[in-house]
Image (cartoon, helix red, strand yellow):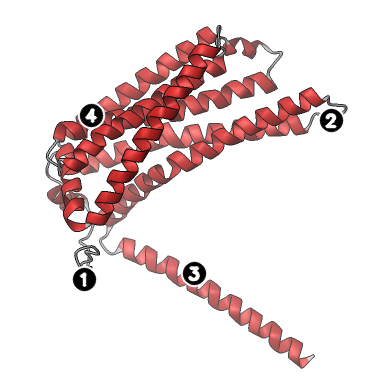
Amino acid sequence: MENFVNISSSPPEPYNCTTWDQRWGAPYLQRLAHLDLQLYYDFYAVWVSLMLCNSVMLVFGVSLNSLALYIFCGTFGRPSATVVYTINLAVADLLVALSLSVRIALYHSGGSCVVCSYIHTFSYFVNMYCSILFLTSICIDRYLAVVHASSTLHRWRTAGAAKFVSCTVWVIAIVVTYSFQTTALESSPSCMLLPALFYLTVLEFLLPLLVVVGFTLRVACFLSSRHGYVSQKSRARRIRAVGLLATVLVVFAVCFTPFHVRQILVYFRVQVGAESPDKGRTVLRGYGRRGFEGVEQFWMRRRGRQAEDKDT
């Protein structure tokens, strides 16, 4: 049990750029590979669980995305813009699933396969950001189809325009990921890597998230503001449009928010620690004190009302 829950009683070291770089002076990918070796020795049950989860996701991810590609590529003769984005989204998800095989090999190697680490991180980040941008493209396409069905903006919904946008998305994701990974391989200080990772999170997650939320709300408001007689076919079309956008928003939030929230928290944790070793703990104590005071005030008000009721 002591090996499984490996908790040290000593206080953590202050987080600043100097101690961070001393602790993580090895190349980025070598550190990532050794994390699996440490996970194997310290948390063996977690290591086995991750192996099983990745194996299951590999099987289902490859099977379902291959089936989706077969359906979309074989069913539609002249694909629309939405179908083009959906095909590219399925390709990105399929490549993410295939990268899990490299991840499993990295687990099995005990952290010795640095090449596996490079392949996995590169393919994972490229296809994750491609998935984010293709979901955003589907949302914008639905917005143009519903809100601007009769305007000149509707011409951007052609298959040719969708193919151009898809190629641009792939190029941007590959170039950005390669640049960031090259910087990491050069063993740059974490003081440079963390801001780059933060800006990457803002540009390729927060902005697309705001776009998805904004366009989803805009379409919902547009459809709800159209009163009068609505045929059964039009009503069903509206429900499908809102349902698709809601699905995109839910998938976006569930699949990508936890990872990027973690990235932002890591960035601010290091930044706060760099300013003052005790500042982070002071902030946490301040939040805890406020929460306790809020609970205390709630119970005091409740007891006061109960006393007044008894007096009356």
How far, Cα to Cα, is label 4 from label 1?
37 Å
Q: Secondary structure at mark 4?
A: helix
**Mark 3 lies on residue:** 291
Mark 4 or mark 1: whose residue is earlier in sequence: 1
| Residue shown at the point (49%, 32%) measured from the top left | 208
Identity, as a three-letter code, of the amino acid under mark 2: His
Mark 4 or mark 3: whose residue is earlier in sequence: 4
View extreme (right): residue: 229
Nearer to us of marks 3 and 2 is 2
| Residue shown at the point (20%, 35%) measured from the top left | 117
Locate residue 194, reporting x and y percent: 28, 42
View extreme (bottom): residue: 311
Locate residue 205, reporting x and y percent: 44, 35
Q: Are marks 3 and 1 in contact (CB under 8 Å)?
A: no
**Mark 1 lies on residue:** 9
Locate residue 200, reporting x and y percent: 36, 34
| Residue shown at the point (22%, 60%) measured from the top left | 14
Quadrant including the N terminus: bottom left
How far, Cα to Cα, is label 4 from label 2?
54 Å
Identity, as a three-letter code, of the amino acid under mark 4: Ile
The picture quadrant where one finds residue 153 is: top right
The picture quadrant where one finds residue 108 is: top left
Image mark count: 4
Q: Secondary structure at mark 2?
A: loop
Q: Secondary structure at mark 1?
A: loop
**Mark 4 lies on residue:** 119
Q: State whether residue 172 appears in this view.
A: yes
Q: State whether residue 186 appears in this view.
A: no
Nearest the camera: 112 or 301? 112
